[in-house]
Amino acid sequence: MSHAIEAEGLVKTYPKGVRALDGLGFAVEEGTIFGLLGPNGAGKSTTVKVLTTLSRPDAGGARVAGLDVLRRPDRVRRVIGLVSQRSAVDPEATGRENLTLQGRLYGMEGRELRGRVAELLERFGLAGAGKRVARDYSGGMQRRLDIATGLVHRPKVLFLDEPTTGLDPEVRADMWRMIRELARDEGLTILLTTHYLEEADRLASRLAIVDRGRVVAEGTPEALKSELRGDALQIELGDGQTNGEVHRALASLAEVRDVVLEGRRLRARADDGPRAVPVVLQALESAGVRVASVTVSRPSLDDVYLRHTGRRFEEADRAEEVKTR
Amino acid sequence: MTSLKHTWYMTLRHLRALARQPWYIAFTLVQPMIYLLLFGSLFQKITGLGHFGTADYIAYLTPGIVVMTAMFSGGWSGMGMVFDLDRGVMDRFLVSPVRRGSLINGRVAQGAIVAAIQALIILVVGLVRGARFDGGPLGVLALIASAVLLAAPFIALSNATALMVRKEESVIGAVNFILLPLTFTSSVFMAKDLMPGWMQTVARFNPANWAVEAARDAALQAHPDWGSIGTHLGLLAAFTVVAVALATRAFRAYQRSV
């Protein structure tokens, strides 16, 4: 199977010495949705900028649809669509005008263009709003127009940079459905960047976890999670427990490992979660540790992230947000 | 061919936005009207000093205000570019096969049309205020050409500034720090012969002065010096070409920084 996107050893340093990409590389099979998952500031958007010819890397290279991004940016531009993190809708123009201008820039004209514009307005539920200026659209409508704009010229590869950031949960679910349908119906290759674990999990057939400008793990969401072997146990403890007590109680148990106590929250891993629960509870009880609640879950991408980077996804996300502010 | 088409598409985009907010032009004329009507009346007697080429200060001032308005309007053009950069609009264009030059040319074309409309409105107000323009239709045409050719390079430079600094504040700063001094070192308000010597020297190299000299000569004189007008307009056209080329190159600077 051929690759729609290949990136290798991408390095990009911004003035002020911020290293956005630090040897990042991955490959995307044609016709699939590939997720780049990482906290804010991990280098996802910079990767998209390089792959869409907007920015040049300091080192490394990339091919999109078989075309060299650095040597033939003009040809790459003809076969890609970009839906960037910030809305690219012209608010002073109507939905129809936005789409028409975009098509014209790719040399589309006349009936072909009109047909395509009408089709996209229909598909994205904007048929009734095509003649209104985009300024009056809701956030969800603008986002849909954004995606439609990225598709007018029938690109082979679509870049969706944080497509649902800032949208309501309902609108987000709607957007997910649309993205899935797109990949299925149009045979598109989609590169999706996101800092929502759930989004990557649901949409991407493969994903790369990006941290500090490099890929730290890559695979299908299922494979990444099963690498962790077993289930996650989360136990809320009652008041007044000390680390020592808890560890002493659980250290000798064969059923659990990776025991971590954060405040009153105890995390551990078990090959067979349901079977480990009674054993753990009994051990804690005989050590005099009170338990408020127990949850058993399949490992999440958050656990995968923790395992590869040593920090929780949310912490990293928040830390970066503070830094970039 | 493609460049022309793309320029037309971009011009259309900006003209549509303007057509949806026509009051924008009225808004840009508030300050010029204050200058023309209040400043014009305040300094009415100044022509008594001589060297103005006319006894009517309003008639003297009108072409000056036309030119000044065109230059400032052009200077603000970069604000639209900052807006496009802040949203993802410009990035969307830059990853498409659009010709970079057309992104500047479209704004220049729209700005030229705005400058012409502003010029006509100011001219009409001048006429209503009793100014006489002996240059006739041809003189008025040359006056509009001066305004357009002064607006154009400043539109391009304003967009270049926007691309390189990407901040509204910087565009505002550039407009005030550069365009205001250019206005006062030209004969917009004061006859050139009455300016201090060093200012007269500066005025010779000042595009605003090229435009106002050409505009005033063409509009006010029954027999204008077309040779001098042609030279001034030619200089402005050359300045425009350089400024547009510079602004188009500024896209590279922008792309290096993202």
Image (spheres, coloured by chain):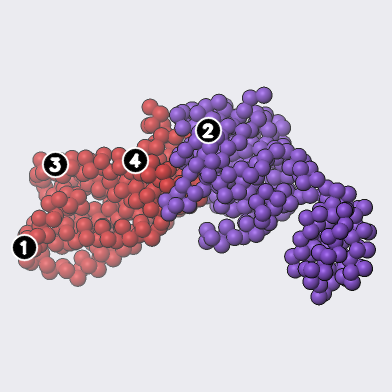
Chain colours: A purple, B red
Q: CA distance from mark 1 to mark 3?
A: 26 Å
Residue named by callout 2? A62
Residue named by callout 3? B231
Q: Are marks 1 and 3 in contact (CB under 8 Å)?
A: no
Residue B82 screen position, x and y as percent: 42, 52
The kind of residue on which mark 2 rests is Ala
Residue A226 screen position, x and y as percent: 79, 43
Q: Is residue A294 above or below residue A19?
A: below
The kind of residue on which mark 4 rests is Arg
Please say whether residue A18 is visible from this viewpoint. Answer: yes
On whether disc 1 and disc 2 are found on a single subunit, the reply is no
Front residue of B103 and A41: A41
Q: Residue at x 45, y 49 (%)?
A: A14
Q: Residues within 10 Å of mark 3 (few under 14, many from 20)?
A: few
Q: Secondary structure at mark 2?
A: strand
On whether disc 1 and disc 4 are found on a single subunit, the reply is yes
Residue B258 screen position, x and y as percent: 46, 46
Front residue of B157 and A4: A4
Residue named by callout 4? B249
On whether disc 2 and disc 4 are found on a single subunit, the reply is no
Q: CA distance from mark 1 to mark 4?
A: 46 Å
Q: Chain of mark 2?
A: A
Q: Chain of mark 3?
A: B
Q: Residue at x 76, y 43 (%)?
A: A227
Q: Chain of mark 4?
A: B
Q: Secondary structure at mark 1?
A: loop
Q: Are marks 2 and 3 in contact (CB under 8 Å)?
A: no
